[in-house]
Image (spheres, rainbow, N blue to C red):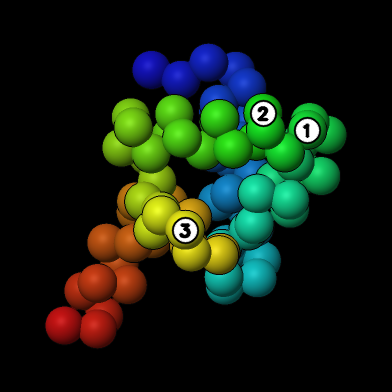
């Protein structure tokens, strides 16, 4: 279960993906949600821990909603 802020973050990530076909950065998320980058990074960390997104550590623009990640993996198999 997500908090309201986490749900807004997840929705932003999904919408960003749909509009741009690539992952948002932490900075993009912070600007979109009007929060500081530390808060955005914490939301992403919680979403990852709860299984809503995947993210490669120390790599830029790798935040991917799990349903998109699964689709991409099927496509490239």
Element type at mark 1: loop
Residue 42 at x, y percent in the picture: 56, 30
17 vs 39, nearest the viewer: 39
Q: Earlier in the sequence, mark 3 or mark 2?
A: 2
Q: Quadrant of residue 61?
A: bottom right
Mark 1 vs mark 3, foreground winner is: 3
Question: Which label belongs to residue 39?
Answer: 2
Residue at the (83%, 34%) spot, across then down = 34
Left or right: residue 47 compared with residue 61: left
Residue 68 at x, y percent in the picture: 38, 61
Circles 1 and 2 in contact, beta carbons < 8 Å: yes
Residue at the (38%, 17%) spot, across then down = 1
Residue at the (69%, 46%) spot, across then down = 29
Q: Identify the image quadrant of the C terminus.
A: bottom left
Q: CA distance from mark 1 to mark 3?
A: 19 Å
Residue 26 at x, y percent in the picture: 65, 49
Q: Does 59 sit above or below residue 39?
A: below
Q: Residue furthest front?
A: 58
Q: CA distance from mark 1 to mark 2?
A: 5 Å
Question: Which label belongs to residue 36?
Answer: 1
Element type at mark 2: helix
Mark 3 vs mark 2, foreground winner is: 3
71 vs 29, nearest the viewer: 29
Question: Which label belongs to residue 54?
Answer: none
Circle 3 residue: 58
Residue at the (30%, 67%) spot, across then down = 71
Element type at mark 3: loop
Left or right: residue 4 compared with residue 27: left
Instruction: Tell me the crowding category of disc 1: few under 14, some 14 to 19, or many 20 or more residues within 10 angstroms, Cα based.
Output: few
Q: Does 57 sit above or below residue 47?
A: below
């Amino acid at each position: 279960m997500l908090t309201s802020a986490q749900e807004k973050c997840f929705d932003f990530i999904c919408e960003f993906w749909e509009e741009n076909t690539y992952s948002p950065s932490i900075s993009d998320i912070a600007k979109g949600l009007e929060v500081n980058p530390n808060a955005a990074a914490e939301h992403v960390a919680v979403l990852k821990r709860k299984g809503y997104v995947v993210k490669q550590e120390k790599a830029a623009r790798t935040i991917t909603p799990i349903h998109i990640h699964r689709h991409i993996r099927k496509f490239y198999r």
